[in-house]
Image (spheres, rainbow, N blue to C red):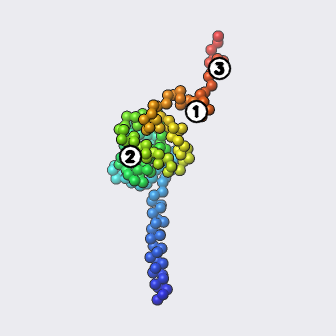
Amino acid sequence: MKNTFYLSILAIVIAPLLQVGCQNTTTEQKKDLAGVEVFPAVEKTAEWVKFKYRDHMAKASNGNAESIKAMLEFSGTVDGVEALDHAVTCIELIPLAGDPAFADVLMHGKPLMRKALLERFQIAQARTKDEKFRKPMAEWAPATWAVLNEKPIPTSQDNQKGPFGPPAPASPDSTGSKQ
């Protein structure tokens, strides 16, 4: 009788733990499209609202302004953890889409959207698995950072400086002209 009682208690305790273990497999992210994290829960929401998430991701990764805009506007569809997961995907798309293209779309977006994205992108930087996105955004996406923070966009000359200062001027011999 005691053994049956203990086995029943043990079964009651272990059964929920097995379900928790199974739930972890549904929240795992996938690496896709040149290492960009894609989260199944976000894809499920996109499917539910008939948003072609992967199509827009692929087009956005090539700098397509309409798809970048669609991906950013989709941020208003998701909330909670899904919003942060989607933000991880978005920040990882920036280098693929091109920082200037991403910044241009943001610049023409609504101010409240930019404010919300700034907050989400900051949290997403801590959530991403890719270390290069954990660095300050001003280092790897200066134009996007400037637009999100309502700062002037760095000029192309500023972007050329790099971590060691401006590039050395070309020598007169390297121009190929004869004098």
Nearer to us of marks 3 and 1 is 1
**Farthest-out residue, top:** 179
Percent coordinates x, y for residue 114 in the rendering: 39, 40
Name the element at disc 3.
Answer: loop
| Marker disc for residue 162 | 1
| Marker disc for residue 75 | 2
Residue drawn at 46 percent across, 79 percent down: 9
**Label 2 near label 1: C-beta < 8 Å?**
no
Nearer to us of marks 1 and 2 is 1
Name the element at disc 1.
Answer: loop
Assess disc 3: are there few (<14), some (14-19) or many (≥20) residues with their C-alpha within 10 Å of its C-alpha: few
Residue drawn at 45 percent across, 45 percent down: 121
Front residue (pair 36, 139): 139
Assess disc 1: are there few (<14), some (14-19) or many (≥20) residues with their C-alpha within 10 Å of its C-alpha: few
Whole-number angstrom distance, CA of label 2 to CA of label 3: 49 Å
Q: Is residue 167 left or right of residue 146?
A: right
Whole-number angstrom distance, CA of label 3 to CA of label 1: 20 Å
Residue bearing the label numbered 3:
171
Q: Is residue 161 above or below residue 79?
A: above
Of mark 2 and mark 3, the one earlier in the sequence is 2
Residue drawn at 62 percent across, 22 percent down: 169
Assess disc 2: are there few (<14), some (14-19) or many (≥20) residues with their C-alpha within 10 Å of its C-alpha: many
Of mark 1 and mark 2, the one earlier in the sequence is 2
The kind of residue tagged 2 is Ser
